[in-house]
Amino acid sequence: MTVKGGGVDDVELPENIALAWGLRDRSSRGPKRSLSLEQVVATGIQVAQAEGLPAVSMSRVASELGVSTMSLYRYVPTKHDLLDLMVDTAFGPPPPPRAPDEGWRAALARWGEGNLVALRRQPWMRHVAISGPPINPNQVRWFEYGLVALRGTGLRATERISTIMLVSGYARSWAMISLDLAEAAARSGQTPDEVGLRYWRNLAVLTAPGPYPAIHELLAEPFDAEEHPDEDWRFGLERLLDGVEMLIRTRASGPARD
Amino acid sequence: MTVKGGGVDDVELPENIALAWGLRDRSSRGPKRSLSLEQVVATGIQVAQAEGLPAVSMSRVASELGVSTMSLYRYVPTKHDLLDLMVDTAFGPPPPPRAPDEGWRAALARWGEGNLVALRRQPWMRHVAISGPPINPNQVRWFEYGLVALRGTGLRATERISTIMLVSGYARSWAMISLDLAEAAARSGQTPDEVGLRYWRNLAVLTAPGPYPAIHELLAEPFDAEEHPDEDWRFGLERLLDGVEMLIRTRASGPARD
DNA sequence: AGCCTCTGCGTATGGTCTACGCAGATAAGC
DNA sequence: GCTTATCTGCGTAGACCATACGCAGAGGCT
């Protein structure tokens, strides 16, 4: 219940947060634990990675560890807390922070791409709902490095936060869409191109009788369906960064920085 | 199994899509159905709206309708198909399309805001995972109107699609974050401001001992935590539209439109 | 009239999370 | 060394969940 007292005197940290930061102090009485929280989390990740998030059940993780289902609840208050910890661990540390000679734009682009890469490496993560603002250790590190990229740009506090959320939200959206498509393709044993083609054909059939001029226009245009797979990702990212850059420019040359 | 033959001669539409567009032709033999698909979907929405998505179980919806659980499977192949239909219906029709005298930017802003409003009106929708590109009736209508907003901007087909996805993805991210926060607040009986304050305090405590200069900088800055609630939404949207506008300008004045 | 199809639904399978409480292990306090 | 408080893993059980399967009967079609 109480918390390890380093410089950190915090009576009121919610249990899941204390857990994530390794701040539970357990009195040394009683039998020794046969597992560690890290082991439990790692096993959860392993199962998720190998067989997908739905395969992650308490009983599955437990049997993987050779303990009973209910034992896990000595390590984790709730399944959802386990999932949160899995995500934080699986995300891993962020890419290196902005270097001294690096512009904010390049740094933020790298940071956004890091988000995408992490989600792609552990695709199950996209199905775990975000539970709130960044508070777990790796999440906080990512947050820090995102802010570092925007240092000295003249953006206000809330603007820096919003900008970072914009980029990470975009990475998440993109990861969801592209991975869902890829998985749908794999499930049906087709290439992603085939699935895409089938989609456009279906859309054409369905919209044929109705008033969908803009969609018909779209379908009439020649389509190089996916030259490079990540060109579209880049497109959105550049738009986004352009928008931020416009603001930063007005801030730099405009009214004195408050 | 077969499909109503209007101008639509399509042997191969997946079942869930045919269902959504009302294209199942059922031979008139056998007893009459006691329900309609629309009723089932509407009841699902009603339950979700009143008690949240987790309350939506097949047995719950069935008992609400006064039929047995398994009867629902005569209307819907799978629970997830029901959820998709619920989302499509609950989203409703998009806001009016771009008016003749309206610029693309105003129209796209309205469209994005429409997304947000829809998600806010039926907050449970954000927890239903997007199953793919827009194919259900209302989704397609939204898609159409989004494209209409970008007509005549000189953007290429893939660029128009990416732009729309950028905006709707942003609306979804934003809805998720803001609604999660609001719900967390409501659950703990506090105001959102209190929850936000508690978050910043926790973050301060946790990052105090570690190397988090940018976060400390952030925390040191004076915070008007949420003057108007939707100012941050506006911020991101404007950044995004600025980015798109930059591209459109280069397209308009740059190389001849292909 | 006879058939064939479609209806609603009862039953059953194989999962899910987790509340509760118990037996035994362990270390602190005396 | 003994007592005692505390913590461990875990067995049991409750309350759900989606859905496969198959049956009895309704009701148009021929």
Image (spheres, coloured by chain):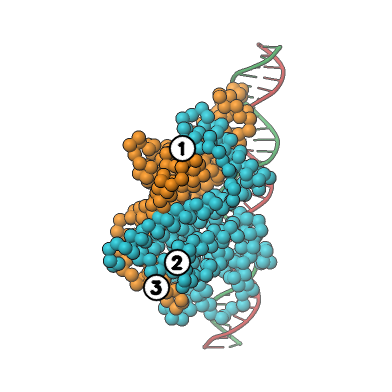
Chain colours: A orange, B cyan, C green, D red
Secondary structure under tag 3 reads: helix
* Dot 2: chain letter: B
Q: Which residue is mark 2?
A: B103
CA gap between label 2 and label 1 equals: 38 Å
Residue at x 38% of width, y 42% of height? A104
Q: Which residue is mark 3?
A: A216
Q: Residue flagged by tag 1: what amino acid is it?
A: Glu
* B91, above or below A233, in the image: below
**B30 or A196, which lies in front?**
A196
Residue at x 55% of width, y 51% of height? B231
Q: Which residue is mark 1?
A: A144
In the figure, residue B104 lies in which quadrant? bottom left
Q: Quadrant of the N terminus of chain A?
A: top right
CA gap between label 2 and label 3 equals: 21 Å
* Dot 3: chain letter: A
Q: Are marks 2 and 1 on the same chain?
A: no
* Dot 1: chain letter: A
Percent from the top left, x then y, of residue C14? 54, 51
User: Which is in the foreground here, disc 2 or disc 3?
Assistant: 2
